[in-house]
Amino acid sequence: MAKTGLAGLVLGTVAAAALAGPGAAMEHSVRIDHASGTTEVHYRGDVDVVHRQVGAVAPGGRASTLSCRWKANVSVTREARHASGSTMTRAIEGARAIEGARAGWCSTQRDAIAQEVAQRTEAMRAHLLATAAEDHPVLMAEIERLHGSTRTG
């Protein structure tokens, strides 16, 4: 079996943008050594915050149930470039990384929600790294399929 650079996933670099709102992105790069050559892998996590208005405004003297429920999803794309020049790309659909709720209208809470998402950068980064780790066997299978194993004996 070809030796892989599994340690590369641990030793890879992560750059997180300040998650100020929708469209913010994080990046993770890793180098995988394979018998057929080195593969440079770049993961990009795009953050998308979805808002959902729930509840109702109550008439005077009664408590309002109005709140904004939100979810921050991370969609990850992978671009891997093998030493031979071949490129292996994959889009990994967004999974809910974090979620929350705030009282009131979504339209007045968007900035506060963006700040909360920014404060939870570690959770988003952990999600990106977990997704990259889960993708590793898929990527290795693609490398094996495209470039074969250079096993002898």
Image: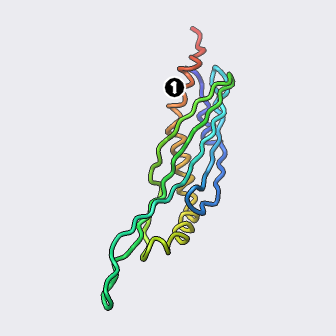
- Relative to the observer, which residue lies in front, 116 or 66? 66
Residue at screen point 51% across, 37% down: 135
Up the image or down, 131 lies above or below 4; here it is: below
- Furthest toward the bottom, the residue is 61
Which of the pair 3/133 is nearer the observer?
133
- Residue 136, percent across and down? 53, 34
State the residue lying farthest toward the top: 153
Which of the pair 44/153 is nearer the observer?
44
What amino acid type is highlighted by mark number 1? Ala
The answer to whether residue 77 is left or right of residue 95 is: right
What is the crowding at mark 1: few (fewer than 14 residues within 10 Å), some, or many (at least 20)?
few
**Lateral position of residue 131 relative to residue 69, left or right:** right
| Residue pictured at 67% horizontal, 23% vertical | 37
Q: Residue at x 39, y 73 (%)?
A: 67
The x and y percentages for residue 137 are: 50, 31
Q: Position of residue 45 (x, y in %)?
A: 57, 48
Picture quarter with the N terminus: top right
**Placement of 120 over or under 104, stated as above or below:** above
Disc 1 marks which residue?
A: 141
Does residue 150 sit above or below 86 in this rendering?
A: above
Locate the C terminus by quadrant.
top right
Residue 84 in the figure: left or right of residue 59: right
